[in-house]
Image (cartoon, helix red, strand yellow):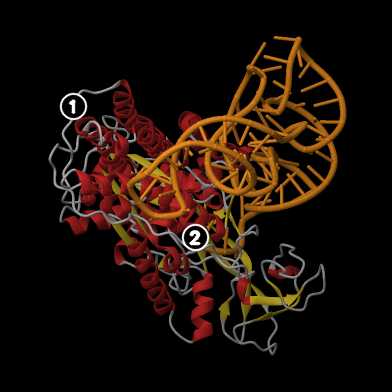
Amino acid sequence: MGEKILVCIAWPYAKSATHVGQIVGAYLPGDIFARYQRMAGNEVLMVSGSDAHGTPITVEADQKGISPAEVVEYYHTQILEVWQRLGMSWDLYTVTTTPNHAATTQDIFLKLLEHGYLFQHTQKAPFCPTDNRFLQDRYIRGTCPNCGNPTARGDQCEQCGKLLDPDMLIKPYCTLCGSKTSAIEFRDTEHFFLDLPKLQAALGTWLASETAHWRPNVVAFTNNWIKDGLHARAITRDLEWGVPIPLPGYEDKRIYVWFDAVIGYLSATKEWAQRQGTPEAWRDWWESTPARPRPARHYYFIGKDNIVFHTVIWPAMLIGYGGLTLAYDVPANEFMQMEGRKASTSEGNIIRTPDALDRYGPDALRYYLAAIMPETRDADFTYADLVRRNNDELVATFGNAAHRTLTFVQRHYEAQVPAIGELTPEDQALLTAATDAFTAVGEAIAAVKLREGLTEAMALARAVNKYLDDQAPWKTIKLDRERAGTSLHVVIQALGALRILLAPYIPAAAQHLHELLGFTGSVDREPWAFVAVPVGQALPPPVPLFTKFDPPTEE
RNA sequence: GGCGGCGUAGCUCAGUGGUAGAGCAAGGGACUCAUAAGCCCUGGGUCACAGGUUCAAAUCCUGUCGCCGUCACCA
């Protein structure tokens, strides 16, 4: 009945356990969206995995004297633990070191080659005679021609910020052997290039037909990037770590990380299908035929730094391959600053996700990140604001609405959902608001306006508090027990709605409220619709949904 | 430097042509079921700055300043 929705989330680089900027940019929005779509009755597949290749991982492996695979395993394990704690509802979270991923990548490589979209080109590249290997820019340091910094990197001088090429450095040297015993040479090396100019026309046609429903900033960024014409891009490197090139004579080269990482969305779907015991099922998500041009809607949740890879390069690869489905939407988020400063690993002001979870747990963190989600422009993360929103909004507005109602019913109505009498216009108004909220919140989430959806849901929580104050069942009960019971019954219906409406955002708290309202099973299985909490349903002793936090001390 | 985005109340942010909005913070009030939570009222903005288009501009155009991103070997 529902349609297929493929939720693709950016592949985190396996070199840290993620920071909250990555969570708010891609992982949390993807998870909220996926959770909603499942409740709305659609068939959802949410996939991603750790991006294992690339130079920084080999650099770290060299520094620690271990293999790149060990580096990846170490961080992949940490990332998996974060997903578990954060409540990410993956259908599959894998890693790019699997044989399946390599096979999928090589298949795309060969098909693009066969279709004439790859070509070989020989270029000069820095080579270290001592180590007998070609060097990535990161492995080279030298004197910056701009500012004279003697340890400028081969790709950029960290002192003056100037972008560099290795041949611009004065006295470049290899950081692997550390010594300056042998000068770096520039030797010929042959590489494969993705012929993006040849794909540009088809890409432009697709973009023109698809981007009407995309976020304006994503469209503007993409159009600007392709406006002056695309350039061919090297997709292989002189490396030992990465997916091997499936051709004889290239044993000492690898497919480079950006090319294989985006293929992960497809390879992960295949791995999911294999694990289901239906290895051909991936076709139902990807294969585009004249009879069924779009078998599934593909959403890519990424940060804005990743836009061109998902709106230009990956679509171009898919077009070149042929017969596969392209993105339906790429709802890229802007960035989040940390305590007023740009999030930067080197500045040391990133907030690691495990640390934030240790301090405040998944619900407060998810709620806060969703509330400030940088959907239209950059936002600012502060612990003080997180605590403020937790205390004022989760505890005082939503949590309190539930707790004040449930404790009253517990005490005065034998811990059962009270019977309902004649409904007043005010009763009808709150019930209507609860029903309408499913449409308002659902439409917002479906359009990937997640902050708006959360605002709509919280408006219902505020309406509950206002209704309670207006109806004052604690007064009414002294005169008319049935009327007070009706008011409480109506409030419980609104709480029943909130348990569903907030489940995509704060699943743990929603599950807790689900149980406090006398339901069993998982709230995730409930349909996205208003369903009455039955009269007489037994209610367990209430426990507050949220904990108040002390404001963080100034440092 | 080129290109793109952003600059709205003390704070965090909505708002894309028609008399400036929300939450929090501040001041006042009535209540007491509730994790002293909730509810009502009030104050507060030359919508970065300077020009322009329009009957009408936070909203469109130009320039300036500030912040963010990107520029293809960061993934």
Q: How many marks?
A: 2
Mark with earlier residue (1, 2): 2
| Chain of the residue that carries numbered disc 2 in the rendered image | A
What is the distance, in whole Å, between disc 1 and disc 2 at their CAs? 48 Å
Q: Position of residue A323 (x, y in %)?
A: 34, 40
At 56% from the left and 83% from the top, the residue drawn is: A132
At 54% from the left and 84% from the top, the residue drawn is: A63
Q: Position of residue B20 (x, y in %)?
A: 64, 26
Task: Pick the quarter of the image with the C terminus of chain A.
Answer: bottom right
Instruction: Look at the picture and state if B39 lies above or below A518.
Output: above
Q: Is residue A224 left or right of residue A318?
A: right
Q: Which residue is mark 1?
A: A421
Amino acid type assigned to the residue bearing label 2 in the image: Val
Quarter occupied by residue A158: bottom right
At 31% from the left and 36% from the top, the residue drawn is: A475
Quarter occupied by residue A122: bottom right
Regarding residue A113, the answer to whether it shows in the image is no
Of residues A68 and A92, the one nearer the viewer is A92
Regarding residue A320, the answer to whether it shows in the image is yes
Of residues A551 and A288, the one nearer the viewer is A551
Q: Which residue is mark 2?
A: A20
Q: Mark 2, residues whose alpha carbon is within 10 Å: few (<14), some, or many (≥20)?
A: many
Amino acid type assigned to the residue bearing label 1 in the image: Gly
| Chain of the residue that carries numbered disc 1 in the rendered image | A
Instruction: Look at the picture and state if A348 lies above or below A493.
Output: below
Q: Position of residue B47 (x, y in %)?
A: 73, 33
